[in-house]
Amino acid sequence: MGLSTHVLDTMHGCPAAGMHVRLYTTQGEQCTLVKSFHLNADGRNPDGPLYDNASLRRGTYRLTFDVKGYFAAKGVDLPEPSFLDQVHLDFGVAHEDQHYHVPLLVSPWSYSTYRGS
């Protein structure tokens, strides 16, 4: 299954359709963009897994979610500066043969994540 993500908008109680997401590989402070995409109606990458099992490698990664842009596009009255702008999740993959699912539950004022299944 490789690597996947899913974003739920906890303010509106729905998937975060249209949110812009970027995936990077990381080495220390160095980040290399792997892909950039907008979430589909279900809050997922429209092309399926970000990596399949054959492509996923042991190492460190970053997912960046454009929280401010998403909620502004939904018409939410955000303060300036907004409390959350870009949410960066840095995580490691230790076992290439396992599935890594990185969900994000988000509102304009908070977020939560975990390693899902």
Image: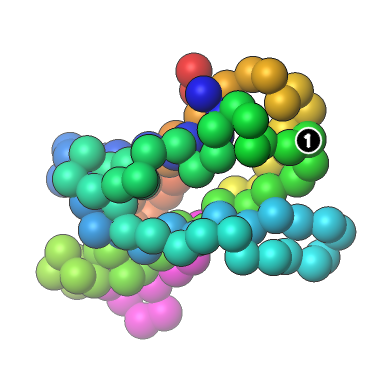
In depth, the one of 25 and 89 nearer the eye is 25
Query: Hey, which quadrant is residue 97 in on the image?
Result: top right
At horizontal 24% and vertical 71% (from top left) the residue drawn is: 72
Can residue 16 be seen? no
Q: Check disc 1 and report the residue beneath it.
A: 58
Query: Hey, which quadrant is residue 77 in on the image?
Result: bottom left
The answer to whether 36 is drawn above or below residue 4 in the figure is below
The answer to whether 37 is drawn above or below residue 48 in the figure is below
At horizontal 64% and vertical 19% (from top left) the residue drawn is: 98
Q: Secondary structure at mark 1?
A: loop
Helix, strand or loop: magenta stretch:
loop
At horizontal 49% and vertical 18% (from top left) the residue drawn is: 117
Q: Is residue 85 magenta?
A: yes
**Left or right, 85 with reference to 33:** left
| Residue 51 position within the rendered picture, expressed as x and y whole percent measured from the top left | 55, 39
Query: Mark 1 belongs to which amino acid?
Result: Arg
| Residue 109 position within the rendered picture, expressed as x and y whole percent measured from the top left | 38, 55
At horizontal 25% and vertical 63% (from top left) the residue drawn is: 71
Q: Is residue 50 magenta?
A: no
